[in-house]
Image (tube, rainbow, N blue to C red):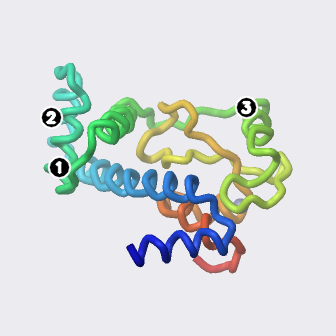
Amino acid sequence: MDDMNGILELMTINDCNEETFFSQLHHTLLLFVLEEVCQKLKSTPAMKDSVRSEFRRTKNHTKLCIRLVYDICGTKLTESDGLLLSSWIQAFFRKSDIRKPVPLSEKARILSLQDYKCACCNQPLKIEDSHYDHIIPWDYVGDELTDNYQMLCSYCNEHKSNNIHYLLKRQIVKKNTGKE
Ligand SMILES: [Zn+2]
């Protein structure tokens, strides 16, 4: 329990919201798994085709996803994480090779939901300086998921890229050091 107390203390003295932190940690762990699965499928086209048709045939996507993740990563998933990851993996199969153009009104809507602050570093952000970002990288899920968008400042946009632990890092590293 010492580690647990240590992390809670670290959160408290850095004004991190415990719930946000743990939910971000959970999300990041699942993204590590997604990244591993997508990279495996990208590098093995025959496997990608066979998994794609398995997803088409089966009615139980969660069970298939849990088995697939265990086979590829050796990771055991809970039912609820299996359900979530199966929706991400199916997005990976559906995704187009071309990015969807996003209207300015949609960007403005998301920025207003974020209270005109960067979703990562919380710095005040104007629409003209903001960048439209896929929370789960576009490379993996394309434009197939709703609620997968946020507006970032130039710095966070540039440094996040496909770096899936960036959001977690931003919970604790709050200033821009210019290095990544
Ligand atoms: Zn930022």
Q: Mark 3 points at which residue?
A: 106
Q: Please state if 33 lies on the left or on the right of 103 as rendered.
A: left
Horizontal and vertical percent position of residue 28: 44, 56
Q: What element carries label 2?
A: helix
Q: Name the residue under label 2.
A: 50
Kindly identify the amino acid type of the residue bearing the numbered disc 1.
Tyr
Q: Nearer the viewer, mark 3 or mark 2?
A: 3
The mark that comes first in sequence, 3 or 1, is: 1
Q: Which of 56 and 85 is in front in this view?
A: 85
The mark that comes first in sequence, 2 or 1, is: 2
Q: Please state if 124 lies on the left or on the right of 8 as rendered.
A: right
Image quadrant in which you'd find residue 10 = bottom right
Kindly identify the amino acid type of the residue bearing the numbered disc 3.
Glu
Is the C-beta separation of discs 3 and 2 under 8 Å? no
Residue shown at the point (21%, 19%) measured from the top left = 59
Name above or below for residue 139 compared with residue 88.
below
The mark that comes first in sequence, 3 or 2, is: 2
Name above or below for residue 77 compared with residue 4.
above
Kindly identify the amino acid type of the residue bearing the numbered disc 2.
Ser
Which quadrant: the C terminus?
bottom right
Horizontal and vertical percent position of residue 98: 51, 36
Q: What element carries label 3?
A: helix
Q: Which of marks 2 and 1 is in front?
A: 1
Cα separation between marks 3 and 1: 38 Å
Residue shown at the point (55%, 59%) measured from the top left = 21
Q: Nearer the viewer, residue 115 or 134?
A: 115
Residue shown at the point (51%, 55%) measured from the top left = 24
Horizontal and vertical percent position of residue 25: 46, 58
Horizontal and vertical percent position of residue 178: 68, 78
Q: Name the residue under label 1.
A: 70
Q: How crowded is mark 3: few (under 14 residues within 10 Å), some or many (20 or more)?
A: few
Q: Which of marks 3 and 1 is in front?
A: 1
